[in-house]
Every structure is written in C-alpha cells, then in structure tokens.
Amino acid sequence: MAISGYGERMRRMRPPSYKALQFEARAAERRDDEVVDTPECVEIHCGWGRLLLAHTFPDSQALINALLREAAGERDIALYVDNPHVVLSLAPQSLFLDPSDTYRLWMTDYRPRARTNTGVVVRRASTRSDVEAINRIYRQRKMVPLKSEVFLRQCRSKEVIYLVAEDVRGRIVGSVMGINHIRVFNDPGKGSSLWCLAVAPDCPISGVGESLVRYLAEYFQARGSHSMDLSVLHDNQEAKALYEKLGFQRLTTFAIKKKNAINEPLFARPEVSPDELNPYARIIVKEALRRGIQVQLDDAEQNLFTLIHGGRQVRCHESLTDLTSAVTMTLCQNKFLTHRVFERIGLRTPRFELYTTPQAADVFLKAEEAIVVKPANGEQGKGISVDIRDTESLKDAIVKSQSVGGDTLLESYFPGQDLRIVVIGYDVVAAAIRRPAEVIGNGRDTLKTLVEKQSRRRQQATGGESVIPMDAETERCLRLSGYTWDSVLPEGQALAVRKTANLHTGGTLEDVTAQLHPVLREVAEQAARALQIPVVGLDLLVKSADQPDYVLIEANERPGLENHAPQPTAERFIDLLFPHSGGPIHDGTV
C-alpha cells in the first residue's frame, strides 16, 4: 500500500524518537502485511567510537548507561535524542549537548550530477593501506583515527561502508563513512547516515567532498534507502553550504556526547581562547592547556604568549622561546651566516656569496649556470627567485630580493625535493617533503581561475596561513612551463605554479618521518647542535627522503609545528619546556 502525499509530508515533519519509530514500525506492518521487528538500544562501532541510535532506546536512563560505557580514547555520539533536557538533567557532570546540526537528504529530492568529477575515483576502502591513508587524513584534520581491527572487520560488510577518493596518481585524498540503517536495525523508515567526511588539506582537486557525498547517497539510494542523515558542527559553514547545495535539509533532533579530553573544546571554553591565535601558536597553547599549564596571552595578534607551570615561566612567539639566544637567532635569520656555520663543520651547503655588483653576480651565474636569488634575512618565501639562468632574469630577481630589504644572497641551484626536518631538544621529531603549489586541470577553467580556487582551498585548510600569490613569480613559473594566465590546462594534468615549496606561498607537505634516512637524521641533529638551538626547522634539498644525498639550505628558528601532523610536535615541544608536566592525556578523562 503506497503512502499518500499527505502521509509523506507528515512523516517528513515528524522528528526522530522512540515513539515515532514504533509508530513507523506499526505503519509498515499494516502497509506490507508483515511483522517489523526493530531491535532496541542499537549501537554501531565505527572505528573511532560508537554511534548510539537514541531513538531505539526505550528510556533516558538506558541511553545514559550506554554513553557512560564509552571506551578510553574513543568518541561516542548519541544521535536522534528527542528529550536532551531530560537526559542531561540525569547526568549533568558526565554528558553534554553536542553543538552540531543534523541534516537529512530525502532521496526523492536528490538529483545526480550530470558530469562526474574525473579528477578522482571513488571506491570502497578494503585494505590496511587504505585505513592508514584514511587515518593520515583524520590526523591532519584533528579527528579521532580509526581502529584498524574494527575497520578490517567491517570493511566488507553491508552495514558499515567506508569510501575513499583516489586522485589520478593513486593517492587517497578523501574519505567518508556510511551506515545502512535498514541493515543495522531493520529501520522501518529505511534511513541511512553519513559520517566523517574528510578531504586532505593539501588536496589540489576541487569537488572531492561532493563526489564522496554523492557516491554514498547513490549507493544507499540503490539499496532502498529513503533518506540519508548527517551531523555537522554548527559553525562549519563550508560543509553546510555543500550539504544544502546537494539538497540536505535541517532536521530537528539533537546529539549528546560524554565529557572527555577529546570533546573538551566543545563543552568547556578555557579562560584563554586558543582561537585568538594563528594555527602555529594555537597547537602549542592547546597542548599546554590540556596538561594543566597556565597560559598568559601577551599579544594575541602577534602570537606572543607565556607558559607558566610549577614556578617556571617561558615566553613564546609560536615555537620560538626564551631558550633560543639572540646570537642563535642571528645565525638562523642571516642565511649567509647559517651557511658559514654549516660549512665550517663539514655539512654540505650550496656554493654561495653575497651580492655586491651586477658584474660579480653575472660571473657567479655563468660559473653555476643556474642559481637561487634570495634576501639574506628573508622568511616565508618572500623575495626568492629559483632556477635563474639568464642575465635579464637575474636583474629582475635581484630587484625583487632587494625590495624585501637587507643583503641579497646568491646560491647555486640544486634540483631535488624540498625536505623540512623539525628538531626539538636536539632530536628529530618530524620530517616532511614540501611540494610547491600546484593545480590540476579540468579542461574548462583558465590557469588564473585554477590558481584562485586552489589558493582559497589552501587558505581554508591552514587558517589563512597559506596563499598562492598572484604575482610576477607565479607568472614566470607559468611562462617557463609554456603557459599564461589565460591557458586552459588539460583535464587531469598537474602543473606546479611556484618554484619554491614554501607553505606560505601555497606549498603542501607530505610526512616522511618514518622513511627518513639515518644520514639525514644525523645531519639535522648535528646542524641543531652547531647552532645551539633547541627548536629548529632545517631545510634540505634531497633526491629522496630515504637516500643520504643532501644539500643543507637554511635553518628556521620558528618552525610551524602545526604543519607536521600526525607527528607529536606540540607534545615534544611542551616536553622540552616542562619535562615533568605529565605528557598528554590519553585516557579519555578530563
């Protein structure tokens, strides 16, 4: 027996609840003339924690008891709570109302996209390497990683579906998870839900998230689902815009979680708000607050703060602290002096000299054939020109460098991968290959449009710290590759639009800590000792992170610790400053 239009409208207006679920079950029995058995107290383990379907729990106390059984280090969520005020009144010290909004997509309203995104291929995740790639993205996005054993047990099931998006190079750049409510608890409403949509912050391809959501919606639609729900944080405007574009509508229901260290930012705002700081200071302050270390914001706009614990005070400017001396700062900031320090202890550096006259610079260029021109005291990639091969380009590069101020340094150019190694307490903590900003063609947009779109994505992923400049250097890089701003890049073709791999000019990082060659590890630690600097980011040019060949380029006295997820850079930083602060909390308690 078909549902009338009026009945369907009433059904859509009815918020999820235990009573509504039972009503739908009885209605389904009358419609289909068969018994509909709906289990109670339904829980699904999702790898990061349990999803509790609150509308299958007969009373509030049963739901509370289930939430309080949360395992250490996990993040459970109870969705479809219709009486949150009652639940919270019974356990106010243990539970809190999740500040999220629930959305629902009715399959009858969904419209498939006419043109598929050829930049990625969406498929089911099924292997250990898949879950490792998913967890890499989760850690970059500060999400609770999946437990491998849970994933491997569920990845071929019909109840829980894990999807990944692969780019043309086979790299996993996005992931989403879905739950089939029909399979899980014989849902009479024939629903489904979407969880943990995540796209790699360094992904240069547009529309990855949309491709994953559409694939999952069409997957469930083909298997008889009438709707697909999701929960999204109330202030995630970018995600909400995507969901509303696809036809999702707000659903009046609530979610409840247990108070724990993972969820603490959602229910307890500290006296000092890390949100006032940039990402590089914020990651340190959050780790300090998590350990009970007092934080005093000295100048939030300039990311200056003081950490206080056990009678000890340390002033910080992001990762630069009182432990770094003024002399050491001078050695790092002046790249000419940096090279001299490294050269004297036998570490390999490029050939270098300070700019004096146009004639001397031209002699240096002819001797080296290809050179790098940069401010001796520059940072964040400003004023740098790479792979200069002719006199005219040399003149322009010198003018560009001098516009930043101070001396200009000439270096021999070495092709290779740009490797950043972070050393804390004279031990290597993280290593990452830094790649120049690149775009991927779609056969329609001009390079100017592609660069603008990718720049916006990098800004969003880094809190505004990474932007691709629309400047003469980017234009020069396009010209060297045979393109202009108005060129249309063929579909699927990647193009580097900068020569330098600096994060601040749109570059991205790939963690290679596990692959780092022992020679490179020893070089980094030796360089840190030579500079007498306890926290430093060292930049090298290498053939590969797992090979010993290198050229040491420069040292950064204030490395961005935020950029090296999933490595524990902030944890090791606080360990260095306060070695007896107890380490990060992992037991799930506040």
Image: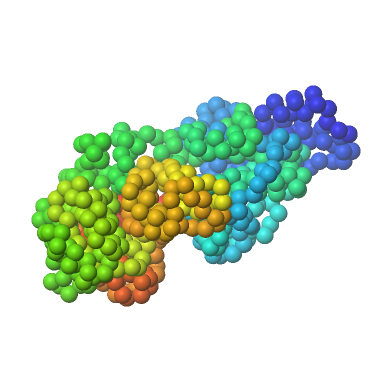
What is the quadrant of the N terminus in the image? Answer: top right
Q: Is residue 288 above or below residue 525?
A: above
- The residue depicted at 70 percent of the width and 27 percent of the height is 14
Residue 551 visible in the snapshot: yes
The image's colouring method is: rainbow
Q: Position of residue 22 (x, y in %)?
A: 75, 33
Compared across the picture, whether 557 is left or right of 172 comes to left
Which of these two is toward me, 403 or 241?
403
> Number of marks in the image?
0
Compared across the picture, whether 269 is left or right of 78 comes to left
Q: Position of residue 419 (x, y in %)?
A: 33, 64
Compared across the picture, whether 127 is left or right of 269 comes to right
What is the quadrant of the C terminus in the image? Answer: top left
Q: Quadrant of residue 224?
A: top right
Q: Quadrant of residue 346?
A: bottom left
Which of these two is toward me, 357 or 186?
357
- The residue depicted at 46 percent of the width and 53 percent of the height is 439
Q: Is residue 300 above or below residue 70?
A: above
- The residue depicted at 67 percent of the width and 40 percent of the height is 228
Q: Quadrant of residue 82?
A: top right
Which of these two is toward me, 156 or 312?
156
Residue 324 visible in the snapshot: no
Q: Position of residue 278 (x, y in %)?
A: 32, 41
- The residue depicted at 20 percent of the width and 47 percent of the height is 403
Which of these two is toward me, 292 or 525?
525
Q: Position of residue 584 (x, y in %)?
A: 35, 51
